Image (cartoon, helix red, strand yellow):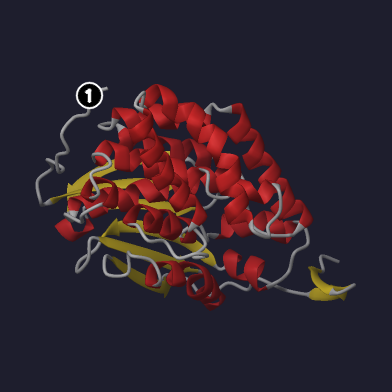
């Protein structure tokens, strides 16, 4: 399969391209602005149609990469992958009271990974798949989209050691997707290894060693908005994870001023800093993206802080939302 040569955006420096995914709609807006803000991918609530919006964002970034696009098409229609996303969500949300780990999380983090990878490419960052001689830019996008969207399927077995379970469960899916794209077993094995490394290292256990795996880890850390925590909260989970998730209105991925990538978090309550400090920041700091990503966090400037919890009660050994 022929792969087009990579080219940088052709838009003038004084134009801004904004991709906004809010409630499932992807819009492209061009206007005069600072070239440092050239590209924005924003995820906010409501999340009911975010798969549709994330899908549009992913397709936008993969339009010049036929191998990656073919892999994405195959993955998103794969019955085994779809089933594992659903079971993972049931285990994490219904049984553990955690935030979303199913299809929405897979699509949102997939879109985030594509945005980050594109900005790194535009910033002339050398990618490991290319630097190692394993493949080209198209191959890199393929590795990242597959690794990112499959990173949490191991939760279908158990949350404990879910990274390793994800690797095991991803093997037959990757084999099925990659074989028609890479007839050469030698190259296919290397591409698969790169994707499995991204899956295995997404939670920093162990630490990611490649830029591609680091993109997966950081993309995973960007999915902290209140839509992800609302379902767990409604199901009765009242802890720092669900409460702090409700305090984050949006996460935007855009071109940085000093570094290739900037991530901006807007909170409706200062409690959202827990999500940033415990989930997102470590994945930036401890991955290979630390020197390429700016992180900015602020509360909304046009409204007072929201009250998230009104009353809770201790039921058994856990706090639950008291709606009476």
> Front-most of 178 and 60?
178
Q: Is residue 123 left or right of residue 83?
A: left
> Front-most of 202 and 23?
202
> Front-most of 63 and 270?
63
Q: Is residue 57 above or below residue 243?
A: above
Name the residue that disc number 1 marks.
Answer: 2
- Image coordinates of residue 318 in percent, x first then y, are 82, 72
Q: Is residue 311 visible?
A: yes
What residue do we see at 22% from left, 24% from top?
A: 2
Q: Is residue 76 left or right of residue 290?
A: right
Q: Is residue 22 visible?
A: no
Q: Is residue 154 above or below residue 37?
A: above
SS type, badge 1: loop
Mark 1 nearby-residue class (10 Å; few <14, some 14–19, many ≥20): few
- Image coordinates of residue 48 in percent, x first then y, are 58, 43
- Image coordinates of residue 298 in percent, x first then y, are 41, 74
Circle count = 1
Q: Is residue 285 left or right of residue 272?
A: left
């Amino acid at each position: 399969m022929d792969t087009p040569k990579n080219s940088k955006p052709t838009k003038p420096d004084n134009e801004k391209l904004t991709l906004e995914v809010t409630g499932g709609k992807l819009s492209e807006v061009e206007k005069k602005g600072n070239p440092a803000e050239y590209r924005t991918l924003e995820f906010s609530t409501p999340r009911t149609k975010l798969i549709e919006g994330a899908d549009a964002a992913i397709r936008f970034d993969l339009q010049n990469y036929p191998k990656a696009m073919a892999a994405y098409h195959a993955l998103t229609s794969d019955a085994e992958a779809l089933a594992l996303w659903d079971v993972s969500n049931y285990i994490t949300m219904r049984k553990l009271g955690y935030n979303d780990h199913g299809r929405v999380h897979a699509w949102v983090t997939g879109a985030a990974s594509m945005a980050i990878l594109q900005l790194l490419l535009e910033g002339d960052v050398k990618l490991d798949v290319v630097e190692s001689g394993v493949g080209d830019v198209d191959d890199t996008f393929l590795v990242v989209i597959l690794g990112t969207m499959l990173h949490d399927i191991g939760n279908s077995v158990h949350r404990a050691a879910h990274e390793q379970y994800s690797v095991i469960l991803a093997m037959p899916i990757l084999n099925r997707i990659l074989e028609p794209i890479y007839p050469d077993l030698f190259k296919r094995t290397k591409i698969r290894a790169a994707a499995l490394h991204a899956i295995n290292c997404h939670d920093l256990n162990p630490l990611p060693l490649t830029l591609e795996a680091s993109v997966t880890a950081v993309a995973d850390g960007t999915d902290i908005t209140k839509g992800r925590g609302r379902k767990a909260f409604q199901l009765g989970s009242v802890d720092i994870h669900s409460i702090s998730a409700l305090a984050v209105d949006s996460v935007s991925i855009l071109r940085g001023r000093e570094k290739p990538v900037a991530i901006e978090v807007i909170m409706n309550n200062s409690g959202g800093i827990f999500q940033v400090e415990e989930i997102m920041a470590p994945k930036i700091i401890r991955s290979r993206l630390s020197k390429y990503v700016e992180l900015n966090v602020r509360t909304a400037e046009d409204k007072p802080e929201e009250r998230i919890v009104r009353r809770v009660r201790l039921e058994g050994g856990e706090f639950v939302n008291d709606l009476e």
